Amino acid sequence: MKEIPFFHKPKYAVRSNEKAFTLLEVLFAFSIFTIIIFFITPVFQIILNNKGSQAELQAMEWQTFCSQIKKEIRLSNRAEVISGRLILTKDTETVQYEKYGSNLRRRVNSTGHEIILQNVSQYSFTILNNAVKVVVTDLWGKEYSVVIYPLINWNAVT
């Protein structure tokens, strides 16, 4: 009688060093891929929609700026532009509008630091015939402008 070795391998056994994917591994990888795509899609939508919301926000900020500067100019006694700054005089106060970095700021009596408009690349203040013209270009290249008339005639006061 022939002895069978204790560690005898069957003739048709699968080798453990074969490198192949099983169906379970493919399904697992596909499910991970699907989950990643599922979460990345909304992120791209948020990024792409952010540009539109930024433009809307800039337009609303411009409207607020216009309201504030109109009120300030209408209540002032005198307006002048010196070195790119708009200087408004009201009784004993002087209010300056000037650029600070990429912002326009407001200062009263050369003190303070109130940001009144953000994301500004270019600006200009121009004194017209008894009016002030403000032109602002934002960081995205959109230009805004407004002409503001005071309640009193500055030419008659000075």
Image (cartoon, grey):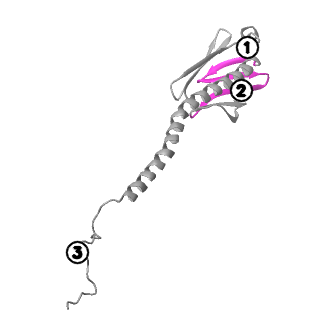
* Residue 140 lies within the magenta run: no
Q: Main secondary structure of the magenta part?
A: strand
* Residue 77 lies within the magenta run: yes
Contact check, label 1 and label 3, Cβ < 8 Å: no
The picture places residue 31, in percent across and down from the top left corner, at: 45, 52
Mark nearer the N terminus (1 vs 2): 2
| Three-letter residue code for mark 3 | Lys
Mark nearer the N terminus (1 vs 3): 3
Q: Residues within 10 Å of mark 2 (few under 14, many from 20)?
A: many
User: Which of the two residues, 89 or 12, is positioned nearer the viewer here?
Assistant: 12
Q: Dot 2 corresponds to which residue? A: 95
Of the 4 image quadrants, the one containing the C terminus is top right
Contact check, label 1 and label 2, Cβ < 8 Å: no
Specify start and end residues of the magenta stretch as a single range: 76-101
| Three-letter residue code for mark 1 | Pro
Q: Dot 1 corresponds to which residue? A: 150
72 lies above or below 34: above
Which residue shows up at 29% across the image and 63% down it? 19
71 lies above or below 50: above
Q: Residue furthest bottom?
A: 1
Q: Is residue 42 left or right of residue 74?
A: left
